[in-house]
Amino acid sequence: MTEQSISLERLEDAISVFGSFDENIRLIEHELGISVVSRDGQLKISGEDPEQVMYGTKAIENLMALAARGEPIGEQNVRYVLQLVREGREEQVQQLAADVLCITAKGKPIKAKTLGQKKYIEAIKKNVVTLGVGPAGTGKTYLAVAAAVAAFRAKEVNRIILTRPAVEAGERLGFLPGDLQSKVDPYLRPLYDALFDMLGPETYQKYLERGNIEVAPLAYMRGRTLDDSFIILDEAQNTSREQMKMFLTRLGFGSKIVITGDITQIDLPTDKVSGLKEAMRVLKGVEDIAIMRLTESDVVRHVLVQRIIKAYEVDEERRNKKKP
């Protein structure tokens, strides 16, 4: 049996790390097969495997340091810190105490939750065009909208323009009831949801009526030059080569573009090249353009989403190996 100790200097940090009904500590114990007990102002970490005890000690110490810097500790933080510690990257944990990107309408601070997200946000701030590519749940769209709202509030831009391809999976809009706006609204719903979260419905409606916010299908972008705007193209994997070129050339003075997509979920016909994949190849190394790749490690939804993404990746690799 191996045992290590951690001194509890600030009780409030320990309470934050333990979580409601000790759920965070129970998760660490379950993941590493160790025991964590609070006794006489110290945490005693014990277990049969010295390596697992060491991982547990490092994880808890880093979580305590994050708590001391005001970071809320939850299941997602715990799992991510454990992953970094297992990979020998515990020195990077303190980089997770990121700056607040934006405050939502309900007063919730929006921050990067992973190192990948932190680099993504930094790239958006630094570059004119940023491509955020990664699986579902990595915060590509949500963080881009938060960055847009932050830039708008800081008066760095006059407009926020959100767009995405309206026709997906080869479907056509004609079967949907209502006028054109009603037809495209379901496709734009994730963008509306993110804006509602950041601004609140009333403020959103006010800016929409003033023309400060525009949510429209990609087809509406043709023939326009967009100055002093923060433009987000979502679900970009479903653009054609021609659509992507058309969109990129809308860029005007004082504007910023963020393009998000998941190249594993392309709904185009098999004979069509994804505009996002093409852009990643063509624009590589171009000044003021960043290509950021988020991975399953950056998924901040339910842990099962990470496992689903990993399972599909493994299956894809297996099938590719079987191909002649």
Image (tube, helix red, strand yellow):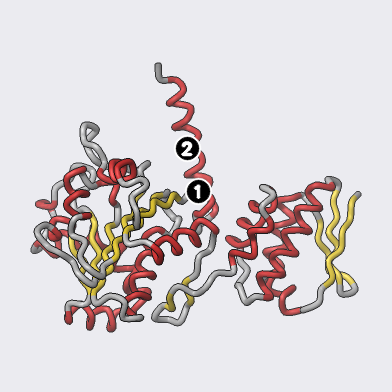
- The label on residue 169 is none
Q: Position of residue 144 (x, y in %)?
A: 37, 64
Q: Nearer the viewer, residue 39 or 225?
A: 225
Kind of residue at badge 2 = Glu
Q: Secondary structure at mark 2?
A: helix
In this rendering, the answer to whether 158 lies above or below 221 is below
Q: Position of residue 240 (x, y in %)?
A: 20, 44
Query: Quarter-wise, where is residue 132 in the image?
Result: bottom left
In this rendering, the answer to whether 178 lies above or below 169 is below
On the image, numbered disc 1 is attached to which residue? Answer: 296
Residue 76 appearing in the image: yes
Residue drawn at point x = 53 percent, y = 45 percent: 307
Q: Secondary structure at mark 1?
A: helix
In this rendering, the answer to whether 225 lies above or below 106 is above
144 left or right of 241? Answer: right
95 left or right of 62? Answer: left
Residue drawn at point x = 17 percent, y = 77 percent: 211
Tell me the quadrant of the picture where the C terminus can be found. Answer: top left
Question: Looking at the image, do the residues carrying marks 2 and 1 touch, with CB atoms under 8 Å apart?
Answer: yes
On the image, numbered disc 2 is attached to which residue? Answer: 313
Q: Nearer the viewer, residue 4 or 273?
A: 273
Q: Residue furthest top?
A: 324
Kind of residue at badge 1 = Glu
Q: Position of residue 121 (x, y in %)?
A: 44, 63
Q: Earlier in the sequence, mark 2 or mark 1?
A: 1
Query: Quarter-wise, where is residue 258 in the image?
Result: bottom left
Residue drawn at point x = 54 percent, y = 58 percent: 115
